[in-house]
């Protein structure tokens, strides 16, 4: 993942009958201006994530896929993949020649993009980190989510103001060229995966008085570097302090050397493609939960109205009570004064 701004991005929205392919898409919000914020290539980036409760961890998606059967992906196809991997001289060539074979033809209901800066998201920590900029990510069409819900946690689920950019992304892939490092790729996977997990978590908690922590993963963040594919899940956990932010933990699902053998390639790529299906399922479920919660709020706004009425009654009661005490004090003082006058009159009559 390039955290520096990229002028081009890859884009495609696929439907159940449309061939999956990413296309170049300009990022008008990108900028090459230098920044004093920390990025994944900085030595303190990983330490900063850990200090803010965002942790890597140790820990399937092993179901076979028909698209990778021997009749559809043979030895010649595997040898071609290995050759493409070996001949790629930089990250761009890996993205263009190698990644499409890993992803295959995707026929889900997701929206897929790459090279889009997540500048519309709220900072994950204290604002000192650069905006996320994943190599590849899958999200949902914005129209699938209720508009009211979409506007409320906008800084958590709408990564960009660009038209057509998917919302609530929860699948990420970090790609490195021959000179890239696994360490940087893993940090990027943790960072972008945590941004995605936060968004899904906000959808799950929409309409609830308290956040819903269940320790279940809803986000998949993978890396591809030097022929090796590694998959990780991300899940939020409760803050360590009452006023703190949620923590995010990354757990390794598995890793495969895709250039080792055709069998290893098929197992690794099957896991990745099954993971995309799983991520879409988790995303759609969270969106459905948020939509249902919003619909319930709109059907029964009584609870909010009653709460407001109770607060208003409490204020009025307090005001009346204070007014009553003040009147009593005034009345008491007036009675004494009148009594004093009557006493003075009586004394005067006796005289």
Image: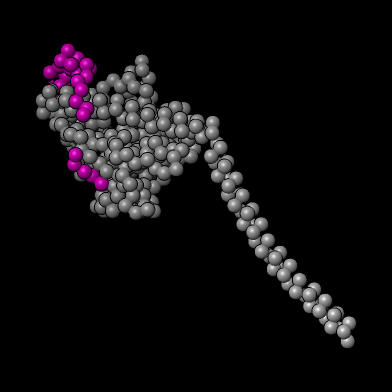
Q: Nearer the viewer, residue 48 or 345?
A: 345
Residue 344 image position (x, y, % from top left): 83, 81
Quadrant of residue 141 in the image?
Answer: top left
Q: Is residue 24 above or below residue 126?
A: above
Question: Residue at the spot x=48%, y=39% of the render?
Answer: 152
**Lateral position of residue 283 relative to residue 153, left or right:** left
**Lateral position of residue 118 relative to residue 59, left or right:** right
Question: Residue at the spot x=85%, y=79% of the render?
Answer: 345
Q: Nearer the viewer, residue 308 or 257?
A: 308
Colour setup of the view: one colour
**Lateral position of residue 3 relative to residue 230, left or right:** right
Residue 72 among magenta residues: yes
Residue 260 among magenta residues: no
Residue 297 image position (x, y, % from top left): 51, 34
Residue 173 image position (x, y, % from top left): 27, 34
Q: Which residues are magenta?
A: 55-83
Q: Nearer the viewer, residue 122 or 239?
A: 239
Quadrant of residue 326 in the image?
Answer: bottom right
User: Is any part of residue 130 visible from this angle?
Assistant: no
User: Is any part of residue 167 visible from this angle?
Assistant: yes
Question: Residue at the spot x=33%, y=27% of the render?
Answer: 281
Q: Quadrant of the N terminus?
A: top left
Q: Residue furthest bottom?
A: 351
Residue 172 image position (x, y, % from top left): 30, 34
């Amino acid at each position: 993942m390039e955290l520096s701004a990229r002028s081009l991005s890859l884009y495609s929205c696929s439907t159940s009958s449309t061939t999956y392919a990413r296309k170049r898409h300009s990022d008008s919000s990108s900028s090459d201006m230098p920044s004093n914020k920390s990025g994944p290539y900085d030595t303190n980036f990983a330490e900063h994530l850990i200090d803010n409760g965002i942790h890597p961890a140790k820990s399937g998606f092993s179901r076979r896929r028909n698209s990778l059967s021997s009749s559809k992906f043979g030895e010649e196809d595997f040898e071609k993949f290995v050759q493409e991997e070996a001949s790629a001289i930089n990250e761009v060539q890996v993205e263009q020649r190698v990644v499409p074979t890993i992803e295959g033809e995707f026929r889900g209901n997701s929206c897929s993009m790459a090279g889009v800066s997540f500048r519309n998201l709220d900072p994950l920590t204290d604002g000192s980190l650069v905006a996320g900029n994943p190599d590849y990510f899958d999200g949902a069409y914005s129209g699938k989510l209720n508009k009211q819900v979409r506007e409320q946690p906008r800084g958590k689920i709408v990564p960009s103001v660009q038209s057509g950019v998917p919302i609530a992304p929860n699948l990420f892939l970090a790609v490195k060229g021959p000179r890239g490092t696994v360490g940087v790729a893993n940090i990027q996977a943790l960072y972008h995966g945590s941004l995605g997990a936060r968004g899904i978590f906000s959808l799950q908690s929409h309409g609830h008085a308290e956040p819903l922590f269940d320790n279940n993963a809803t986000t998949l963040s993978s890396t591809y570097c030097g022929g090796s594919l590694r998959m990780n899940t991300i899940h939020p956990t409760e803050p360590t302090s009452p006023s703190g932010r949620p923590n995010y933990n990354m757990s390794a699902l598995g890793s495969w050397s895709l250039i080792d053998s055709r069998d290893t390639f098929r197992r690794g790529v099957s896991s990745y493609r099954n993971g995309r299906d799983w991520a879409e399922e988790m995303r759609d479920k969270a969106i459905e939960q948020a939509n249902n919660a919003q619909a319930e709020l709109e059907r029964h706004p009584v609870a909010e109205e009653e709460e407001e009425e109770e607060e208003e009654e409490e204020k009025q009661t307090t005001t009346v009570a204070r007014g009553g005490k003040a009147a009593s004090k005034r009345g008491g003082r007036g009675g004494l004064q009148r009594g004093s006058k009557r006493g003075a009159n009586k004394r005067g009559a006796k005289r």
